[in-house]
Amino acid sequence: MKRSKRQLNIPKATKIVTGIAWYSSDQWADLRRVVSDPAELESTYDEWLGVIMRSVPDLINAGFNLVKVPVNVSDLVGWCRQRGKPIDADARAEYVVEELRRLGASSFETITMPI
């Protein structure tokens, strides 16, 4: 007996909301000064922005809904101190996730191309 080939009506996957830590050019030097892993950051704000601009299209094409999460360096420092965390890549990522949860993704600017 042949099995019928029915098409399944599977809804398209919801885009995954992903926050990107968004730094201002005037705070970049402050960020590099306070982090415990400066080698993990680009040397200049323009280099960092270039990396972001090259990465965004791939992330969007992979199904991510990207939102800019502005990071105030002094707020980040205080957040890390409260939790006893070094100001490293893991802490910066955790900070962004917490801000997304606290304020909701709709509170932030969605990143579309071009940036």
Image (cartoon, rainbow, N blue to C red):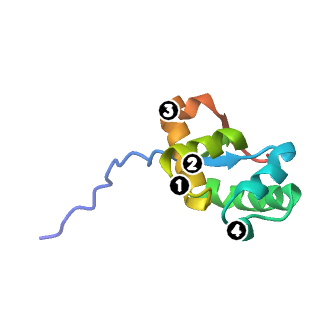
Going by the numbered disc 2, the residue's amino acid type is Cys
Percent of width and height locating residue 41: 74, 64
Residue 85 in picture, x, y percent from top left: 53, 55
* Relative image position of residue 16 (x, y in whole percent): 50, 48
Q: Earlier in the sequence, mark 1 or mark 3?
A: 1
Q: Amino acid at mark 3?
A: Arg
Q: Position of residue 107 (x, y in %)?
A: 60, 28
Looking at the image, tell me whether mark 1 or mark 2 is earlier in sequence order.
Answer: 2
**Quadrant (top left/top right/bottom left/bottom right) for the N terminus:** bottom left
- Is residue 100 shown above or below 35? above
Q: Does residue 59 lie above or below 21 as drawn?
A: below
Which residue, given by chain and number where applicable, does mark 4 sit on?
40
Q: Which residue is the site of mark 3?
A: 102
Foreground mark, 1 or 3, reads 1
Q: Mark 3: which secondary structure?
A: helix
Q: Is residue 90 left or right of residue 72?
A: left
Decide which of 51, 92 is in the foreground and name it.
92
Q: Amino acid at mark 4?
A: Glu
